[in-house]
Amino acid sequence: MKKYIQILMIVALLFTYSCNYLDIVPDETATEEDAFADRYAAERYLYSCYAFIPQEANVFYMLGSTGDWATLMEVASMQGNYSPSNLSYYTFWSSFYGGIKRCYILLDNIDGVPRMDEETKELYKAEARFLLAYFHFFLLKAYGPIPIIEKNFAMDTPNSDYPGRRIFDECVKWISDMYDMAYMDLPERQATTYYGRATRATAKAMKAKLWLYTASPLFNGNGEFYADELKDPETGTPLMPLQYDQSKWEKAYTYALEAVNEAHSAGISLYMGNPDPGSGNYPYPSDVNQWRARMNFVDRANTNELIFADTRNDGFYGYQNNAAPREASGGNAWQNVAPTLEAVKRFYTERGLPIDEDPAYFSEGDYFQLGQYEGQTTCNLHLHREPRFYAWISFHNGWYELMRGNDKRIRTLFRKNDVHGKQSYGRNYSMTGYLAKKGVHPGYNANGSIINYPFPIMRLAELYLIVAEAAVETNNLSVAIEYLDKVRVRSGVPKVETAWEGVATLNQVKLRQIVHQERGIELFMEGHSLWDHKRWKTAHLYVGSNPKGLNVDGVTDAEFFREAEVLVGWKFASPKNYLLPIPQKDVDVNAKLSQNPGY
């Protein structure tokens, strides 16, 4: 993947509100005739359909809307503070239905584009169908049962003709079938100049993810939450499946294996790059396993791991500037992306075990006792951890690999009066005493040098973990271990059976725990955590109260290295917040729409 391009941004603002969720019209051209006047206009219109994909690397989206386990001062306080009339960052409903309308406009008009060959027309149709499936799936995981839109509605359509919410399993079948239809005319690979557009592997992988969610506890026989609520307002029919269906896990397993085969056929493989300390460009991290973790998707020239990616550039207020440590002399680094103590504890020990299950690791009472990391004082919690911890977590007296003057890595120092400490700042400081390094290129320079790269929406490691999770739930335990090990070995973590030998029996319950923790580690800061904990019905355990960090008001080591509550107002009411509210204005105009429970 030697080149990539940015998907053209035709829409000025992705998450704007429309007057109705089907009333979004193309705003980049005067008429549909202009939008499809020639093949160049049609291509721009296709890109405008892609523009509705959320910018996963946008730090405000990642932390404000999908809730990875890190804090950001501007948005963390909004967790749980939303309602049907005050949606905060949760504008998926209007945005995705706007994207859906665009896709149908393309499907209705593409055949009339002059001097466009039929093969290209069929490709654009396939990409539009893929996006229809993707947008509907995103709505499904956020809201549960949704209206399925099967055509372009005219602007003067009466409110009474708008569709209501379909039964959840009907939604799943429609989306799954749409992925299949798109697959038939998608290419095995896109040309390097069209990197970021859908391929056959993309369709297969996203279909597997659809069924992973469908089979998960939130949506599969969840009578605990939805037995007496969430019904069709006209018929009283339950919209959620109230009986558990094991066959959904079987389908998730089958489709995930199909997706793996498709990805391998397309040349997609785990990133296995090697550091080159002698090159003088990016000599750190010099450890091969840390390098592979840090670079697996930011090494845009050499990674073959991405199945679907967002190729929009990281902006001035984007992720890298927000995650990097500040400079004493100024610059654009604001050190806002602060992993919580829960995220820090989640990473394995060097033996590949959870810190509280490794018999050779420090006891909980000794986590914050002082120790030495490469000659400098830190706490025991930061010692003897797996390579991904050191690749992705910046801690006190740990290394942060980036360009800073003549230095290509720096020590981060987070006590109150230290260079990266709270000092007298009212904002732009780490609220937990940690920073995230994942997603920040080692070539980053706070004086304006941001190295852009495609941000993963789906990469092969995630697909392997989908196989592993579905294999656990279908009792194919040897397959689950096989696919877990693919991810662990690349990360420099001992294989599952090696790590757990003599510690625990690898039965279905234990392997389920391992898969869940592996997802939390491998996909850290990629926008998956809250979605995963929602579908597992465990979100209330993690975001129902304020997170923990270190004491950033501590001046000395003894004061700094102790657990402290981060006052950001995290809230999560169960079962209410497991689904998002439908915008009140849409419920008001469409009597067929029932609001989600609790709102």
Image (spheres, rainbow, N blue to C red):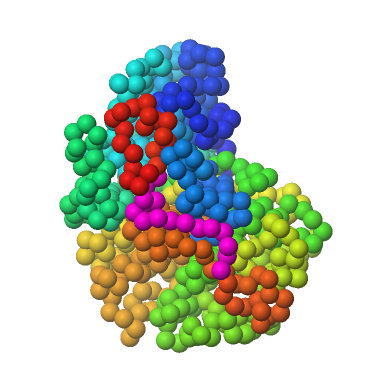
The residue drawn where x is 64% and y is 57% is: 336
Give the vertical position of 409 relative to 104 (above or below). Answer: below
Q: Residue 2 at what x, y percent from top left?
A: 56, 46
Give the vertical position of 422 relative to 216 (above or below). Answer: below
Side (left or right) of 153 relative to 11: left
Q: Residue 111 at what x, y percent from top left?
A: 39, 17
Viewer-nearest residue: 128 or 54: 54
Quarter of the view holding residue 482:
bottom left
How would you classify the magenta stretch by its main secondary structure? Answer: loop
Side (left or right) of 160 relative to 558: left
Report if residue 251 is visible in the image.
Answer: no
Q: Which residues are magenta?
A: 565-580
Q: Is residue 193 magenta?
A: no
The residue drawn where x is 46% and y is 37% is: 85
The residue drawn where x is 31% and y is 67% is: 512
Report if residue 219 is visible in the image.
Answer: yes
State how many labels appear: 0
Q: Is residue 577 magenta?
A: yes
Q: Residue 481 at what x, y percent from top left?
A: 31, 68
The residue drawn where x is 19% and y is 39% is: 237
Viewer-nearest residue: 20 or 129: 20
Q: Residue 346 at what x, y percent from top left?
A: 47, 70
Side (left or right) of 80 relative to 166: right
Viewer-nearest residue: 317 or 18: 18
Image quadrant where one finds the C terminus: top left
